[in-house]
Image (cartoon, rainbow, N blue to C red):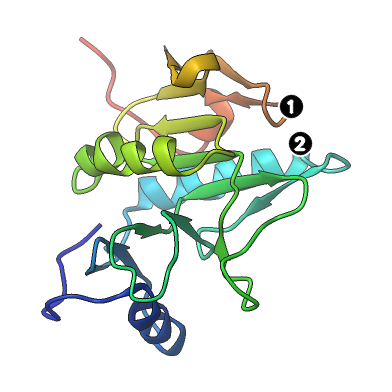
Amino acid sequence: MGLPQTHPSYGFDDYLAQEREGECRQEYLDGQVYAMAGETLEHSTICFNLAAILGAQLRGKPCRGLSPNMKVLSGKYSPGQIKGLFSYPDVSVVCGEPKFHDERRDVLLNPTLIIEVLSPGTELFDRGEKFRRYRTCLESLQDYVLVSSASPMVELFQRQAGGFWLYSAVTGLEARVALPSIGCELSLAEIYERLDFPAEA
């Protein structure tokens, strides 16, 4: 998430009208609109690798992966609504029939899995307020994955009964992460293919 725009406050409808007519992606949080920042080589490479890994594994399954251009709404819509989050996850997967905000079919309501690739400018938001909105507003969400762009590390939050979330993390290129909600597995060697990291002391 980048810097907020100068407009004092947008409603859902105002934001969507501007977003659909514009050429730049912007995220929305409680009436404020934020320009999306550019991405580093590392971030871009990881996103491409994740899409390739999951795309191959999802063939023939009742789940589909979506590109970073698909918006996700975390919040309830009503006329004049301001409070809510429109975001562009780095990777999202929906299982079963996708549900959308309206007939434009460009705002997803029921992701099963969301992956965010961390960067210095967005990490606090991805870990904090964004995840809070995801886990409280998206009943369909089963797995939330954070992928470091600074070192080989993947963190997984899995929804449990009673509203709890189970946390696990793996590090090192030999590690793997199972994603049972979509029947897939991530290899860190494949996630970080073509990237080099400084050797640890």
Q: Residue at (24%, 36%) from the top-left corner?
A: 128
Which amino acid lies under the numbered mark 2 shown in the image of this protein? Gln
- Tell me if residue 107 can be seen: yes
- Tell me if residue 173 can be seen: no
Q: Residue at (25%, 41%) from the top-left corner?
A: 129
Residue hosting label 2: 57
The answer to whether marks 2 and 1 mark residues whose Cβ atoms lie closer than 8 Å is yes
The CA distance from mark 2 to mark 1 is 8 Å
Which amino acid lies under the numbered mark 1 shown in the image of this protein? Gly
Q: Nearer the viewer, residue 170 or 25?
A: 25
Looking at this view, name the residue that lies furthest to the right. Answer: 60
Q: Is residue 111 left or right of residue 90?
A: right
Q: Residue at (76%, 36%) from the top-left corner?
A: 57
Which dot, 2 or 1, sits closer to the camera? 1
Residue 180 in the image: state x and y as whole percent.
Answer: 68, 21
The image quadrant of residue 182 is: top right
Residue hosting label 1: 183
Q: Is residue 127 left or right of residue 98?
A: left
Residue 89 in the image: state x and y as whole percent.
Answer: 45, 51
Q: Secondary structure at mark 1?
A: loop
Q: Is residue 30 above or below residue 163?
A: below
> N-terminal of the two: label 2 or label 1?
2
Q: Secondary structure at mark 2?
A: helix
Residue 173 in the image: state x and y as whole percent.
Answer: 49, 19
* Mark 1 surroundings within 10 Å by alpha-carbon count, few (fewer than 14), some (14 through 19), many (20 or more): few
Q: Is residue 52 left or right of residue 127?
A: right
Q: Is residue 175 left or right of residue 116?
A: right
